[in-house]
Amino acid sequence: MNRIPFLKTHDDVRRLQLQLWASIIAWTFLVLVLLFWAVRNEDADMLELARQEAVDNFNKDQAFRNWGTKHGGVYVPVSDHTQPSPYLSHIPERDLVTPSGRQLTLMNPAFMLRQMMDDYNELYGVKGRITSLKPLNPANAPDEWEREALMAFDAGETERFEITEINGQPYLRLIRPMRMQAGCLKCHLQQGYMVGEVRGGVGVSVPLANYYKVTGERKQIFLLVLSFIWSVGMVGIFSLTNHSRQRIDERKRYETEIWRQANFDTLTGLSNRSLFMDRLDRALAYARRHDYKLALLFIDLDRFKDVNDTLGHAHGDLLLQEAAKRLQDCVREMDTVSRLGGDEFTVILPEMIENTSAATVAGTILTSLSRPYKLDGQETKLSASIGITIYPQDGEDPGMLLQNADTAMYRAKADGRNTFRYFTWEMNREAGGRAALEADLRHALKWGEFELYYQPILNTLDGRLIGAEALIRWISPKRGLVGPDEFIPLAEESGLIVPMGDWVMRRAAADLAGWDEMGLVMEQLSVNLSTLQFQAKGFTRKILEFLDSQPHLRSRLFFEITESVFIDEGTEPGARLAKLRKEGIGIDIDDFGTGYSSLGYLKRFPVDKIKIDRSFIRDVTIDPEDASLCEAIIAMAHHLKLGVVAEGVETHQQLRFLQRRGCDYAQGYLFGRPMPVEQFTEYMKENLSFDKVVN
């Protein structure tokens, strides 16, 4: 059976998924890096601000200490809060009394700053203290961290800080060195310090709680902003991925459609000729490897062209679709059903054990296809002809097998249709004869091997010769007289009917002009017009131009067309026929009653006469059904004011029947067979009358 192979887009989808995950990971990593960088910068900024606050407090301490040192300290009233310092007892002027009797005591800068820092701590939470490896006040003795810092200052370091906890709260501790100045020796001389020497350090502890709070809020803002940016990026990534996926899907659909158009028939969904040949190659290769037989069936629907011509191409398309479904139902899953074009189908039957298996399948197909088709409320019957060829006995090449199956199919058609035939090598020789016949037909058209014969048409009431039907004949130097039944169908299939029809028009017009010059004036000249000619592009324009050059044809030329012309209304046959009639060309319906159309077409389309087919006239005197049908056709035509011509009149009994029913015209062997132009000229001179025929 026919399946569309899987198109390899899996790699593209997988690549797209990898790109999606790579993009997600890369974008997330980038945002995390930005978040880490922002948090780190925020922490660094927070620490720098806290450090700067500590440095500012240190600088204030230093500024006051320098001022106090330059002035030798500050005297303050003695109070409970400012008692005389026991560490300055060696200074004679430590205690003073003002003339007013107020008692003052000397307060060194370090002591004053410690009190100020205690107050600052209570007000703002910033702690500060002075420390030294040789403190005057034991309370100023360094802790372990301060000791390490002071020792580092001796080695040249200028600052040290840390993040620590004090009473369970986070603080930034900063300590910087203090160098001995000349004014400091007043209090520290006994300690053995020298000017410029590091005598200790001033530490500041800044609370970080507020800094952490503000930093935390800013981090949350950063997190929200970056989360929004990450979300926007993810939306963009998924949007681009979705767009890429859509493009892959569109490309897949496009490639699928291109592949389908290149390998499958758009009407039936079956594999086309290209895919059929590929699968035939594969099936043959498999058969060779495993020593299997293979059968190829070539199926052609019988008289499908008549269906298209009479019921229309839309109905024909529906019929082809239904036929394709029936074909698929008749074969195995491994078999391949293809449509080569038009109404031609093929079936590949691989892995055959016996040749009779192909006959079984062919019989099933014929039975299935011959069942009535009910489409658009209309029932249609159809049959098929099947040619069968077998690998390897009939050939090993795909092209040869297809040609052989086609040849066998034509034999099935020649043997009566609705059957199948196996290929034989004898058929090839016969097929070569058909190809030779077409070649000779082309040669005949080129070198003028055709002649026109004329068959008289008489008025049944008075016996007058009112006209003739022009009939083409092929006089081949090699084949002799070739019957129209042999070459007309081939001309239709090959398209040669169009140039042949043009030649008939020119020859008939010339003959009619010659008879006019001889005084043998004939009222009507009928010329057969094929559906292919009528549907050819530019036909109406070509005929009207021909009439302008042959004015003697006006009101005397009649086109004989079949009912199939009326069916395909999409080509506007009514409008074109009306235009031809307006220019003086009569329209006759040939072989009336043998097609698919109804009598209603006569009312809707411009027609002058109808010709009752010879198949109804043959038994009109012995078959009541044929008699009733002829009576109905004549009555209906007269009701529509149309003339009636009876074809194939061969006996006096048929003629009298037609006369009694009011048939207007008749032609047939009773009045004369088709004759060459010279013989028909003599026939016209004799002016054969009705009375002569009767008597």
Image (tube, helix red, strand yellow):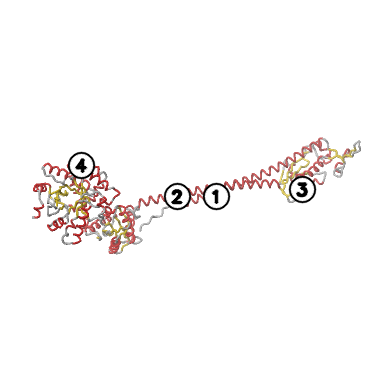
The span from disc 1 to disc 2 (Cα, nearest Å) is 23 Å
Q: Which residue occupies the foreground of this view, 622 or 497? A: 622
The span from disc 3 to disc 4 (Cα, nearest Å) is 131 Å
Q: Verify CB contact (< 8 Å) between mark 1 and mark 3.
A: no
Which amino acid type corresponds to the residue marked 3 in the rendered image?
Asp
The span from disc 4 to disc 1 (Cα, nearest Å) is 83 Å
Disc 2 target residue: 248
The span from disc 2 to disc 4 (Cα, nearest Å) is 61 Å
Q: Verify CB contact (< 8 Å) between mark 2 and mark 4.
A: no
Which amino acid type corresponds to the residue marked 1 in the rendered image?
Ile
Local secondary structure at mark 4: helix
- Quadrant where the image shows the C terminus: bottom left
Mark seen at residue 547:
4
Local secondary structure at mark 3: loop
> Residue 373 location in percent, x, y?
30, 59
The span from disc 1 to disc 3 (Cα, nearest Å) is 49 Å
